[in-house]
């Protein structure tokens, strides 16, 4: 596991040398919101709602593409029991700024951004006491408040096999937070 951290760190450092457009290529974001286990109609009940927390650091390689590493946690509920299912999810992602990819020269409002972020990571379910490799996919809507600070809404989901019920599982979340560029 330590080799994964070292590899990701070295990748982030090496990517910095290729950044050309801005001196504010690094991003740090933190957010909190809610999550549920599942997306079926029976999953949308109050006892299935739990808090979601995200922490990310990344680098815009170009104005269109960034890489980031992050953490999601702390626990989720299921409709099968009343326990807190504690977990840790460490992941890597590629961010695609849709507005920049389409045509950034014709953009009227440069404060709004839509970002798609697919990735994968290491999911550890403390209830099962075992690791899992899961996918993470989401869409971020961000608004620049001041030069280096953005507020964002991230709708995303952790997807994998046997996260909590023994088959294909999903942990969707909706998080609001702040992102700082430096």
Image: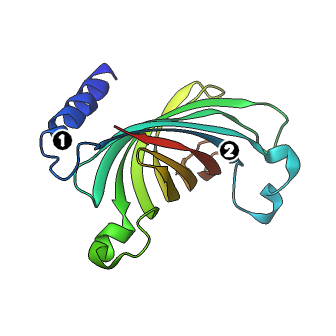
Is 76 placed left or right of 125 in the picture? right
Residue that protrudes farthest toward the front in the picture: 146
Q: Quadrant of the C terminus?
A: top left
Numbered disc total: 2
Q: Is residue 103 left or right of residue 133?
A: left
What's the distance in space between the residues labelled 2 and 1, CA to CA? 30 Å
Q: Earlier in the sequence, mark 2 or mark 1?
A: 1
Q: In this figure, which residue is indicated by the disc labeled 1?
A: 15
The relative height of residue 39 versus residue 107 in the rendered view (above or below) is above
x and y, in percent, of residue 147 in the image: 41, 48
Q: Of 12 and 120, which appears nearest the observer?
A: 12
Q: At x 85% / y 35%, what residue is drawn?
A: 82
Instruction: Assign a secondary structure to mark 2.
Output: strand
Q: Which mark is residue 144?
A: none
Q: Nearer the viewer, residue 138 or 25?
A: 25
Left or right, 124 with reference to 53:
left
Report the disc number at residue 33.
2
Q: Nearer the viewer, residue 86 or 152?
A: 152
* Dot 2 alpha-carbon crowd within 10 angstroms: few under 14, some 14 to 19, many 20 or more: some
Residue 69 quadrant: top left
Callout 1 secondary element: helix
Residue 156 lies, with reference to residue 102, above or below; the image says: above
Query: Residue 109's x, y, as percent?
Result: 44, 71
The answer to whether residue 39 shows anywhere in this view is: yes
Q: Position of residue 110 (x, y in %)?
A: 40, 66
Q: Badge 1 local density, few (<14 within 10 Å), some, or many (20+)?
A: some
């Amino acid at each position: 596991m330590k080799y994964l951290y070292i590899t990701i760190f070295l990748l982030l450092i090496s990517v910095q040398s290729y950044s050309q457009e801005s001196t504010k290529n690094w991003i740090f974001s933190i957010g909190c919101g809610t999550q549920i286990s599942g997306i079926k109609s029976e999953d949308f009940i109050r006892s299935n709602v739990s808090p979601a927390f995200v922490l990310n650091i990344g680098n815009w390689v170009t104005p269109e593409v960034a890489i980031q590493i992050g953490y999601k946690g702390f626990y989720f509920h299921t409709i099968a029991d009343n326990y807190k299912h504690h977990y840790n999810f460490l992941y890597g992602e590629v961010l695609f700024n849709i507005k920049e990819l389409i045509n950034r020269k014709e953009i009227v409002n440069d404060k709004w951004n839509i970002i798609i972020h697919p990735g994968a990571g290491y999911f550890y379910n403390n209830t099962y006491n075992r690791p899992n490799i899961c996918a993470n996919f989401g869409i971020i809507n961000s608004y620049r408040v001041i030069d280096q600070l953005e507020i964002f809404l991230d709708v995303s989901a952790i997807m994998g096999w046997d996260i909590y019920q023994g088959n294909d599982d999903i942990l969707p979340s909706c998080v609001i937070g702040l992102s700082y560029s430096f």
